[in-house]
Amino acid sequence: MKKQYFLWVAFLYALAVLYLASAAPISPHEAKIFYTSSDIVSSFMHMGDDLFGNLFGLRIFFVLFGFFSILFFYEFSRRSFDKREDAYLATFIFMLLPGIVTGSTLANIAIIVLPFVLLFVLLYEKSHFTVLPIIMLILFFIHEASVIFFIALLLYGLLHKDRKLSIFAAAFLIAFVYLAKGIEIGGRPSGHFAEIFGLYAAVFSPLVFFYFFYTMYRIFLREKKSLVWYIAFTALFVSLILSIRQKIGITDFAPYVLIAVPLMLHLYHNSLRVRLPEFQKKYIVSFKVIISTLILSSVSILLYQILFDITKDTKRFYSNSVYAPYILSEALKADNIHCYDTTDERERYQLKYYNISTCSE
């Protein structure tokens, strides 16, 4: 991808993210965190709300974390590819992943964790080990699912004889065990294994996830394994194993799998460039199809919000858990009603954000 094209896409992308962050109604997850939690996500939400007093303020810090993620990813991609055009293309794919688009516009822990993971990998590639323990310490405190990250670091350190990395990773894993932190494990065999594939398809877009899965498997069998592969593969493997017995929160794993875009692009280039031009056509066509579906997936997120803002078609959006409380609150206010009883806890918090209290209070 040429630089001028990338810059135009980046500019339009920034406008789209800012629009979505300011226009999309508060989600059930955001509302519950805002009113019931005291974690780092809630803290950033309240800080932004105090500064701006609106939905954009609620999400401003997450938008910034999203932009930092793209910046760090680009810097990492520059080190991963010989040609700068390939780094632009990798960053283009990364920022259009639905998980990055939605993560940058809604309050969530994944978009806070992601830039720290990318910064860690970038600094490790540059051999700046002094700062790495600080990043590890930050991840340890802000994300309980970072135990996945430390398992991957320990495996990589042991197999590649990186003594410092192994010691620090082992120390943090021991701290997880001692403090009884980490991902909750429980339940019994259930139907969540198929569900996790749907979640990953939503984060990557379906065809991109299929190629991601293939890339992880192909590298496992025969390719050179980098630190990024260890992180992404460990997260994927653990999520699949846990999904056999329990429901998986995709935000626990997304920051560690989304960084694998350069691996996918490397595999595509290796498959393409070892073949004669007359045998490259099917690879080029397949790549264009995958990128087209990725663009459609991301653009549909933006168009959905634009469609709502233009049409205000309440019937079309009333079944959506994000839009329904907003539509209901507007209807109640139009009738000069300022309270409403609902058995749905998250909907109650959403209505509370729109100044609709519970009548029974």
Image (cartoon, helix red, strand yellow):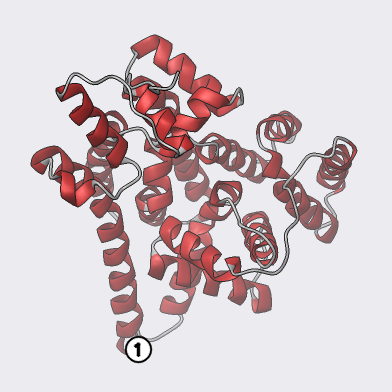
Which of the 4 image quarters holds residue 296? bottom left
Residue furthest top in the image:
51
Residue 290 position within the rendered picture, expressed as x and y whole percent measured from the top left:
33, 69
Q: Which residue is mark 1?
A: 279
Location of the C terminus (image quadrant): top left
Residue type at tag 1: Phe
| Tally of marks | 1
Drawn side of residue 51 relative to residue 328, left or right: right
Say above or below: 136 vs 284. above
Residue at image position (47%, 22%) is 45
Residue 281 in sight from this viewpoint: yes
Label 1: few (<14), some or many (≥20) within 10 Å? few
Residue 40 position within the rendered picture, expressed as x and y whole percent measured from the top left:
59, 25
Residue 228 position within the rendered picture, expressed as x and y whole percent measured from the top left:
62, 55
Q: Nearer the viewer, residue 76 or 337?
A: 337
Residue 338 position within the rendered picture, expressed as x and y whole percent measured from the top left:
28, 19
Which of the 4 image quarters holds residue 90? bottom left
Location of the N terminus (image quadrant): bottom left
Residue at image position (33%, 41%) is 322
Say above or below: 8 vs 196. above
Say above or below: 94 vs 120. below
Residue furthest left in the image:
311
Residue at image position (50%, 71%) is 267
Drawn side of residue 219 relative to residue 353, left or right: right
